[in-house]
Image: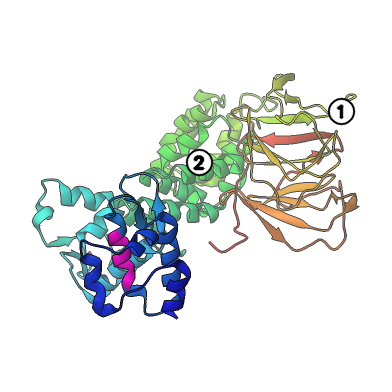
Amino acid sequence: MGSSWATKIGCAIPSPQQTDLFHSVSVSSSFQTWTTRRRCIQWYQCMKHCSGLNSYIPYLITLTLHHPRRRAQCITGMTLKDQGDYCFIYNDPTHHVDFLESFRTFYKQGLFTDVTLVSSTGETFQCHKAALAACSLYFKVMFTSDMREKSNGRIKLTGVDHTILEALLNYTYTSQIKITEKNVQCLLQAADQLHFVSVKDACEQFLVRHLDIGNCLGMHLFAEFHVCPQLEKESRRIIVSSFEDVCTQDEFVETSLEKLVYIYSQECLNVPKEQTLLKSIARWIGHDPKKRVGYIYELLKCLKIKVDDNYLRSALELHKNHLLNENKIQSLLCYCLRSQNQEASKRSTASMFVIGGYYWHPLSEVHVWDPVSNNWIQGADMPDHARESYSATTLGPHIYITGGYRTDNIEALDTVWIYNVESDDWTKGCPMLRARYYHCSVTLGGCVYALGGYRKGAPSQEAEVYDPLKKMWFPIANMIKASHEGERRSKYNTPHITAQYTAAAMRETGVDYHHTSHTQY
């Protein structure tokens, strides 16, 4: 087989015993024939198909490189035009996975460990300083600065339980951690203490998903202490928007004076009646009247409620020797109002937003009506000027414009535009899974739902939900019957209106943002 291939290219192949011939100075004339570029390539192709001839390839390359007439660089059958060094960068896509897997094995088997961590309950864990420093700024600073722990092989972590420490170490070596309702607060505290930033962010997102009226006060205090900006923002939103329900919760009477003053001082506190505010003060003072009755003036000052100070002082002095309770305090506060028909000082700061419309062509203007001043204000125009037949709904301080189509093309759109009523600007959101127009949209449980509508000229039963935390749309069960432009109403959200060419939304400052996950966290 080998000689037949050699005959075709016009040269003789020496036997393995004659390999020294290739090192001799005098080379046969046939050698000069196959050292040309074409012959070199032919030789390589020949070698690939001839078993037993692979041993000649190094000699072929060596002799070709030293040929006096032609110094072509043959590298595995490939001729390079320039004389520069050949460079090849190999990127192993599984290297980081294998690297982490090896470190995980070292951790489990206690190999190459150079530090011992001790939990607050005395359990010990053999670890690697390099792995800890890579995941935690706390350990990085500890092991790189002039601290005692830099050279100490045993470090005790005060305030970190062994189960929490074990979870953080498993995250260090596996990149995974299990967050539950039972361990989330302790896990966030430890992650904040040890500067596991990613774990802290994940715990914060978990708590945001589980916010409700019953725990928003405690979560707001927790968020302030551990500097969790998103948790603080969302818990405050629930407090100010649903204060009438929040003040009836068990957490309310345990709230500190400073926190209560902070809540009452919020300009966007949504309380329709003064009686609600007075009732909340009476309930808070009635929980511990001896210690708290003296704070009544400070609280009323925060609420900007005008009362007859002389009457209030006299009444409190008269009742100081008697047992004060919630009902008596509430009665005193009501009598202190200067007039029964006094206008409430704290009003719902509701605004109405009218987006778009149609006047010979689609409009993209935004008009805002302020009921307090009875004035209309011009907002920022919607970026997609030719859009029509879309739907609108609100979630927190945002108005979501979904779907529709353009005047020059009846093809349905899947695009989403989000209007921020606080900053008066538009941002492009994640596109829907299904393009649609003449559809309904509604918010429920902190999510946006797109229902029905038209696709390709026919009604659609398809529905989907948008998760604002994951910034993604997810499909849900199809509706029983295809619908379009229907009224949509949710149990906990004010209904919003969407007409064929006009989108209008009513919004109250500090809308409740309570997220319920539709997918596993």
Work out whether residue 521 can be spotted: yes
Work out whether residue 92 can be spotted: no
Q: Residue at x 17, y 61 (%)?
A: 156
- Quarter of image, res 107: bottom left
Picture colour scheme: rainbow
Element carrying mark 1: loop
Q: Residue at x 73, y 35 (%)?
A: 506
Question: Looking at this rendering, what residue extends furthest in the front direction?
Answer: 29
Residue kind at label 2, given as amino acid type = Lys
Q: Nearer the viewer, residue 133 or 97?
A: 97
Q: Where is residue 363 in the image (x, y as percent from the top left)?
A: 81, 26
Q: Which mark is residue 233?
A: 2
Q: Position of residue 174 (x, y in %)?
A: 36, 66
- Quarter of image, res 90: bottom left
Q: Position of residue 421 (x, y in %)?
A: 64, 31
Residue kind at label 1, given as amino acid type = Tyr
Other residues around mark 1 within 10 Å, as few (<14) / some (14–19) / many (≥20): few
Q: Which residue is drawn at 81% across and 39% down?
A: 405
Other residues around mark 2 within 10 Å, as few (<14) / some (14–19) / many (≥20): some
Q: Which of 326 and 491 is in front in this view?
A: 491
Residue on which the image places disc 1: 358
Q: Which of 30 and 294 is in front in this view?
A: 30
Magenta highlight range: 56-63
Q: Which residue is drawn at 34% across and 68% down?
A: 57
Element carrying mark 2: helix
- Quarter of image, res 3: bottom left
Mark 2 and 1 residues: CB-CB less than 8 Å, in contact? no
What is the chief secondary structure element of the magenta stretch? helix
Q: Which of 375 and 28 is in front in this view?
A: 28
* Magenta run includes residue 457: no
Q: Position of residue 220 (x, y in %)?
A: 46, 45
